[in-house]
Amino acid sequence: AIEVADDTLAPLYRAGDVLVVSPTAQVRRGDRVLVRTTDGQLHAAEVLRQTVRRTALRPLCPVNGEQMVLTSDQISGLVRVLWARQ
């Protein structure tokens, strides 16, 4: 479980919300995920498409409304959000 520390994911998740995640759950289109990139950034996003080499994501709180496309070597961790206590 991960506790949200601030309101950067508002209005979807707010400070104090607890996200239950699974690193072993299969990720499918439409799932909400947390992604850690190899440069150390953590992103909350919705999966748009996923192949062996690339993952297309829509940030849950997009700054510029654009999707992100990450290659497999840019992702150090990807976990599916199973449940949120709000």
Image: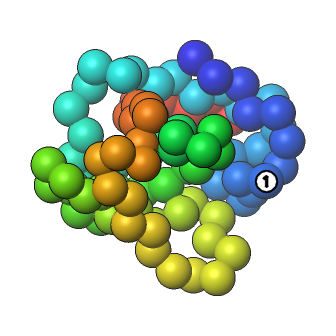
**Residue appearing at x 71%, y 25% in the figure:** 3
Residue 79 image position (x, y, % from top left): 41, 31
Residue 58, visible in the rendered structure: yes
**Residue appearing at x 53%, y 63% in the figure:** 59
Query: Hey, which quadrant is residue 58 in on the image?
Result: bottom left
Residue at the left extreme of this rendering:
52
Residue 67 image position (x, y, % from top left): 45, 74
Q: Is residue 21 left or right of residue 27?
A: right
| Amino acid type at mark 1 | Thr
* Nearest to the observer: residue 18 or residue 47: 47
* Nearest to the observer: residue 46 or residue 73: 73
Query: Hey, which quadrant is residue 48 in on the image?
Result: bottom left
Q: Is mark 1 on a helix, strand or loop?
A: loop
Residue 63 image position (x, y, % from top left): 69, 75
Query: Hey, which quadrant is residue 81 in on the image?
Result: top left
Residue 60 image position (x, y, % from top left): 56, 60
